Amino acid sequence: MAERAEASGTKVMVIDDSNTIRRSAEIFLAQAGYQVLLAEDGFDALSKIADHHPDLIFVDIMMPRLDGYQTCALIKKNPRFASTPVIMLSSKDGLFDRARGRMVGSDEYLTKPFTKDSLLKAVSTHMAAREQR
């Protein structure tokens, strides 16, 4: 129950062009008590990030217009959001994809389809690390 109280003030953004992935993540996160922000692509996300200041961001790699790598790089280049954890989402689990994600500043890499447990574990791990700073 204490975990749910902590979650209530935490804003988590999910950026993915798949409606199914966005809805799944939204349901899992909302059930855990997080405030959820959704975006369909990187351009949509950037204005929402500036307006809402999410505490953690999940971003799909393969998206039209602005892909996940470009989106992550833009988030991390902004001094206001450089410390915001960004977790890459991808159906690919290759070493190259993980390395490229690290190069643009991602904090973690989660393979799709993700489970409720893996999604919530990623959020709690990064939120706990952030509180210790």
Image: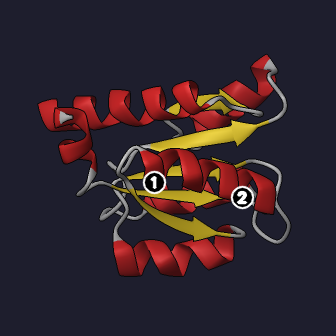
Q: x, y (%) of residue 37? A: 49, 67
| Amino acid bearing label 2 | Asp
Read off the residue under disc 1: 30
> Disc 1 residue type?
Ala
Q: Residue at x 68, y 31 (%)?
A: 114
Q: How many angstroms separate mark 1 from mark 2 (CA)?
A: 17 Å
Q: Nearer the viewer, residue 13 or 71?
A: 13
For mark 1, give the secondary structure: helix
Q: Residue at x 36, y 75 (%)?
A: 52
Tell me the SS state at disc 2: loop
Residue closer to the observer: 40 or 19: 19
Q: Which sits earlier in the primary sequence, circle 1 or circle 2?
A: 2
**Residue under circle 2?**
16
Q: Residue at x 45, y 48 (%)?
A: 31
Q: Is residue 27 visible?
A: yes
Q: Nearer the viewer, mark 1 or mark 2?
A: 1
Find the residue positioned furthest to the top: 95
The answer to whether residue 108 is left or right of residue 40 is left
- Give the quarter of the image for residue 20: bottom right
Q: Is residue 38 left or right of residue 86?
A: right
Instruction: Tell me: residue 7, above or below residue 131.
Output: below
Image quadrant where residue 22 sits = bottom right
Q: Is residue 133 visible?
A: no
Q: Quadrant of the N terminus?
A: top left
